[in-house]
Amino acid sequence: MSVNKNLNNEVKSRGQYLVSSADFFRRVIGTFFHFRFLWKFVISDGHIERVLSNKLTSREIYVHRLFERMFWFWPRALDARVWVGGDYKGRTADKYISFDVSSTVLSDAVQRFAGSKNSKILDLGCNVGRHLNNLHQRGMTNLHGVDAMSSALDMMADTFPETYAAVNLEHNLFQGFLSKEESNSFDIVYSHGATIQLVHPSFDVVQHLCRITREYVVLIHQETLQDQYPRFWHLEFEKNGFHLRHCLRPIGDHMGTENSNHFETNSLLVFQRHIP
């Protein structure tokens, strides 16, 4: 399938969600014009550990921010600091306990595509563990989660103690976790909200997602004209050997305000590994 055809499918798949020329240009930059080979030379394991523990020096932050301003493609992990701190624009861990329509749709999809109760499943950005808890209650027995917010993982121990004791959790950045995870480690990887959209394109999050996943990547994806790091997501999954198996859009109500151009809606996207 040609690049042009993939791009056309990407735009059409957004349905009624208009794509401005500026948004399209940003997606082209985010998809094609990042030198991802730089990641391993710029971002060390020690740097990620210092981001996680909030132990970056002022000098280190200054140098990285300087290069980020100079070069749009400069690898960056500093964005995660706002989530590590546990209070990004008031989005504290307690805001991610309750279940909503999109959470139900996500859990239903994971259960539907899981081969068995023992399918190895990863929640990328598990936060307090509301989705892991729901899947645990549905009888799933091989659950894993990763999140950068230590306060959320601590809250999970109090909020969902049985699930907390039953699942395998890791406190880490997505970049740190995915980089060291072995290929084909999980049957299903899922994520809710803008999680992967918040990862700077200097790190190839889709390539790593597809590398560690044997069968399905299930996303509740926030489609918006103001993605922090917009990319042609469908194209990137196709390039890495996954096709769109199932799609449901929109889920629930559109979100926005009268005084804002910000417009977004949740969609369910299920990508399946191509079978040779």
Image (cartoon, rainbow, N blue to C red):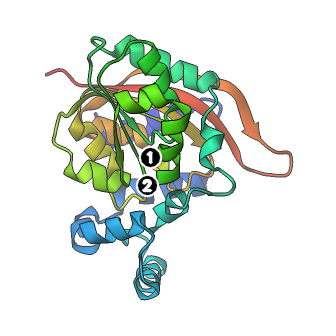
Q: Are marks 2 and 1 in contact (CB under 8 Å)?
A: yes
Q: Residue 139's x, y, as percent?
A: 38, 12
Q: Residue 16's x, y, as percent?
A: 65, 31
Residue visible at 56% across and 33% down? 159
SS under mark 2: loop
Q: In the rendered view of the protein, which quadrant contains the N terminus?
A: top left
Q: Residue 107's x, y, as percent?
A: 48, 20
- Report which residue position mark 1 lands on: 196
SS under mark 1: helix
Residue 132 seen in the figure: no
- Quarter-of-image position of residue 101: top right
Residue 130 seen in the figure: yes
| Amino acid on which the number 1 mark rests in the picture | Ile
| Amino acid on which the number 2 mark rests in the picture | Val
- Report which residue position mark 2 lands on: 199
Determine crowd level at label 1: few under 14, some 14-19, many 20+ residues with C-alpha closer than 10 A. some
Residue visible at 28% across and 30% down? 242
Front one among 9 and 182: 182
Report the side of 175 relative to 241 (left or right). right
Residue placed farthest to the left in the image? Answer: 276
